[in-house]
Amino acid sequence: MNEKTVAATPPPPFNEDCPRCGQPFRCGVNDGHCACFGLEIGAALRQRIASEYSTCLCVSCLRELQEGESPVDP
């Protein structure tokens, strides 16, 4: 039997530089899936990010901001 070797597909190239940290990253929003889609970002943080930045942030920065977000008081 012949076994087929599946060539590893290289990751897509970086297409953005994070405006917060300056690191290059791959924003996949136009691809239909981005790593940030799995993050739970509250409305207040989403508004703050939109007011401070005109483009996407890398997932590392989003996680940092998410961890630093205080829970909303009832």
Image (spheres, rainbow, N blue to C red):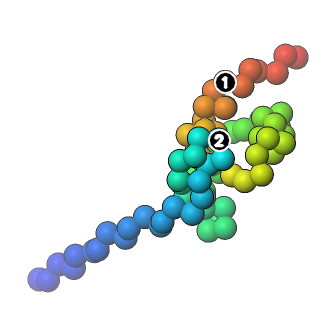
Which is more toward the observer, 45 or 7? 45
- Mark 2 or 1: the one toward you: 2
- As drawn, is 49 to the left or to the right of 2? right
Q: Is residue 56 above or below residue 40?
A: below
Indicate the position of residue 48 as horizontal and vertical percent values: 81, 37
- As drawn, is 9 to the left or to the right of 15? left
Quarter holding residue 10? bottom left
Indicate the position of residue 70 as horizontal and vertical percent values: 74, 20
Q: Is residue 13 visible?
A: yes
Q: Residue at x 76, y 21 (%)?
A: 71
Disc 1 marks a residue whose amino acid type is Gly
Which is more toward the observer, 47 or 71? 47
Disc 2 marks a residue whose amino acid type is Arg
Q: Which residue is mark 1?
A: 68
Q: Residue at x 76, y 46 (%)?
A: 53
Q: Mark 2 packing: few (<14 Cα in 10 Å), some, or many (20+)?
A: some
Earlier residue among tags 2 and 1: 2
> Which quarter of the rendering shows the C terminus?
top right
Q: Which residue is mark 2?
A: 20
Give the CA separation, mark 2 to mark 1.
15 Å
Q: Residue at x 83, y 33 (%)?
A: 44
Secondary structure of the residue carrying tag 2 is loop
